[in-house]
Amino acid sequence: MLAGCSTSAPAATVGSGNTDQKEMSIAVFNGWDEGVAASELWKAILDSKGYDVTLEAADVAPVYSGLSTGDYDLNLDVWLPVTHATYIKQYGDDISDLGVWNNQSSNRIAVNADAPIDSLDELAANADLFGNRIVGIEPGAGLTEATTNKVIPEYGLDKMEYLTSSTAAMLTELTAATKADENIVVTLWEPHWAYKKFDLKNLKDPKMALGGVEELHAYGKEDFAEDFPQAAEWIGDFTMDLDMLYDLEDAMFVKYDGQDYAPIVAKWITENQDYVDSLTA
């Protein structure tokens, strides 16, 4: 009697004493440049250690779904406790929290620095000065959810048009308004390089509709630490303060006008070698 069986080949490992799987996919939220920066940095670091890292851009909801099914291995841009709470409630049991790498972030409603108001509670009465518009980002973003469900009703902004499309479209509107010296209201967040490129101010949020300080977490697929025990340890210990993150974003998005970030990140690494070496010490 002949018996046939098929077995899948074991995944290739990094080697040289590192038993992590060699291939890793990092999902990157479209338009969320702090996540792009952190992901490009870790791709450069891990590739230099013998990994084969692929960055895959997607919208927020598909990233969480993909992490939960193991289609993606890692994401470095999970905002908690407020911004991505809905996604964590839905997918949290099927993904793994690897750690907090920044605890200085926040969601914002911003205007041009010379705008005639300073607080969200002044916006409704002065909506006409801003074209009766709030320019937002992606419909599926946690910031969009907070603006729709909290900011607009709590500050009586329901008569203003709330535009949601993409972060790129918001930045295009912001650029055009700046060139025309016009007032504009946008949904934004810190850290974002727009604060360095444009002269902006955040509107005060006395009702705390956008929540307080947010943490940036790294989340992996459920069994990330089993497939990548060494990388899980490195990423679990990863920290990056706002000053350093803004410096990296400045190099990638303000001083450079292109999409091939690898040489920009490589140069930044050489200028911050001690810090980068400490991430895998």
Image (cartoon, rainbow, N blue to C red):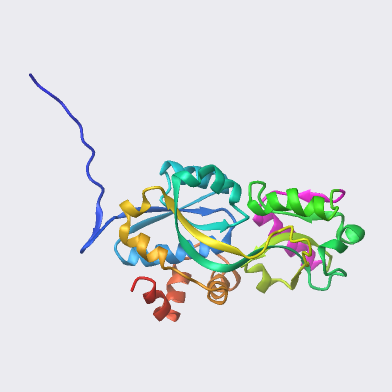
Residue found at the far left of this picture: 1
Depth order, front residue of 210/67? 210
- Residue at image coords 23%, 45%: 10
Asked if residue 102 is positioned above or below residue 157 in the image, the reply reads below
Q: Position of residue 251 (x, y in %)?
A: 54, 73
Q: Is 55 left or right of 35, judged from the image as shown?
A: left
Q: Is residue 131 magenta?
A: no
Depth order, front residue of 269/95? 95
- Is residue 280 visible in the rendered image? The answer is yes
Q: Quadrant of the N terminus?
A: top left
Q: Position of residue 111 (x, y in %)?
A: 78, 66
- Residue at image coords 21%, 63%: 17
Q: Position of residue 32 (x, y in %)?
A: 58, 58
Identify the magenta region.
159-180
- Residue at image coords 69%, 54%: 169
- Image mark count: 0
Q: Position of residue 153 (x, y in %)?
A: 81, 50
Depth order, front residue of 253/233? 233
- Is residue 59 visible in the rendered image? The answer is no
Q: Is 43 left or right of 8, judged from the image as shown?
A: right
Q: Is residue 163 magenta?
A: yes
The quadrant in which residue 69 appears is top left
Q: Is 179 left or right of 241, judged from the image as shown?
A: right
Residue found at the far top of this picture: 1
Asked if residue 51 is positioned above or below residue 71 in the image, the reply reads below
- Residue at image coords 51%, 46%: 64
Q: Quadrant of the C terminus?
A: bottom left
